[in-house]
Amino acid sequence: QVQLVESGGGLVQPGGSLRLSCAASGNIFSIYAMGWYRQAPGKQREMVATLASGGSTNYADSVKGRFTISRDNAKNTVYLQMNSLKPEDTAVYYCNYVNGLTGTIYWGQGTQVTVSS
């Protein structure tokens, strides 16, 4: 089992910044992928950014150049730095972890990000 705890969401004005954190604990395999997804009201959950254990990253086109995913291996924590936020970034943001061996996927509880003036 892997537990994921997100933090860092909140209300921010357009153009502002937020940093989300996702702390992982439990049976973390050495080969994995972690990522951030988001779900806005009435919409499907979509990928925002992913980070593989080997270091490769992937971003949704809508956030490229504005968001950065990173990790602190010592803390088993993945971050999402979000800059130049737009109202359309408003959503519940979820962290996930994928075991590279079994393919098992775990999700965090989500954190609300609201971009509004």
Image (tube, helix red, strand yellow):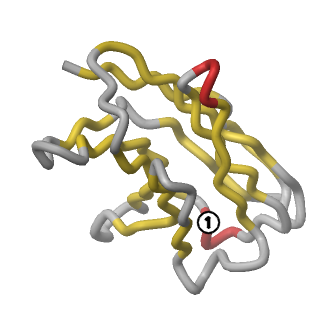
- Please state if 43 lies on the left or on the right of 79 as rendered: left
109, above or below 88, in the image: above
Asked which quadrant contains residue 40, the reply is bottom left
Extreme residue in the top direction: 26
Q: Using the image, determine if residue 44 lies above or below residue 3.
A: below
96, 40: nearer the viewer: 96
The quadrant holding residue 3 is: top left
Number of callouts: 1
Residue pointed to by mark 1: 89
x 36%, y 30%: residue = 109
Q: Position of residue 68 (x, y in %)?
A: 71, 60
Point 54% across, 41% down: residue = 112
Relative to the observer, which residue lies in front, 3 or 109? 3
Secondary structure of the residue carrying tag 1 is helix
Q: Is residue 79 shown above or below 42? A: above
Quadrant where the N terminus lies? top left
Residue 75: % across, % down: 62, 19
Q: Is residue 17 left or right of residue 44?
A: right
Quadrant assignment, res 66: bottom right
| Residue at the far bottom in the pictured view | 61
Q: Is residue 53 visible?
A: yes
Q: Amino acid at mark 1?
A: Asp
Measuring from the top left, give residue 86's x and y in whole percent. Answer: 74, 70
Q: Is residue 4 left or right of residue 104?
A: right
Q: Outermost residue, right direction?
A: 15
- Name the foreground residue: 67 vs 114: 67
Label 1 crowd bin: few (<14), some (14–19), many (20+), radius 10 Å: many
Q: Residue shown at 32%/63% (left/top)?
A: 45
- Given residues 26 and 95, the one toward you in this image is 26
* Coordinates of residue 46 in the picture (x, y in percent): 37, 68
Relative to 15, is 40 on the left or the right?
Answer: left
